[in-house]
């Protein structure tokens, strides 16, 4: 039930809250065992809405996708390492 509520809160936060609050909710969602693909999908949504090439990052236009994918990968690594 908590994963479902956090997933819904994450999806709503993508459209209505600042990126840093969405990131915090994504961290809580992943720590509760949520689906990491939903977080990466959230990054794609943020890139479609706000993505502009960043000159400081060599024109990287998928910043949120890469950021949330790294967040999901780190979550998976920590889950495997700490629970093994």
Image (cartoon, rainbow, N blue to C red):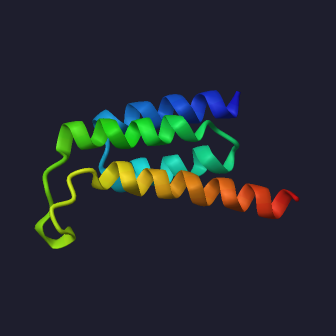
Q: How many numbered circles are shown? A: 0
63 with respect to 36 (left or right):
left
Screen quadrant of the C terminus: bottom right
Q: Residue at x 21, y 59 (%)?
A: 60
Q: Residue at x 51, y 28 (%)?
A: 8
Left or right: 12 with respect to 35?
left
Establish if 13 lies above or below 78.
above
Q: Nearer the viewer, residue 16 or 70?
A: 70
**Relative image position of residue 40 (x, y in whole percent):** 45, 42
**Residue 14 image point, x, y percent:** 35, 38
Residue at x-position 79% and y-position 63%: 81
- Rendered view: 35 above or below 57: above
Residue 48, percent from left and from top? 22, 37
Q: Quadrant of the N terminus?
A: top right
Q: Is residue 7 shown left or right of residue 20?
A: right
Residue with the most extreme right position: 84
Tell me: 83 left or right of 61.
right
Q: Furthest-front residue in view? A: 58
Q: Which is nearer the eye, 57 or 33? A: 57
């Amino acid at each position: 039930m908590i994963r479902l509520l956090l997933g819904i809160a994450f999806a709503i936060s993508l459209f209505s809250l600042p990126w840093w609050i969405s990131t915090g909710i994504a961290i809580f969602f992943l720590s509760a065992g949520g689906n990491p693909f939903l977080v990466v999908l959230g990054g794609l949504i943020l890139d479609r809405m706000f993505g502009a090439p960043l000159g400081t990052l060599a024109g990287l236009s998928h910043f949120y996708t890469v950021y949330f994918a790294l967040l999901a990968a780190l979550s998976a690594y920590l889950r495997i390492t700490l629970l093994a």
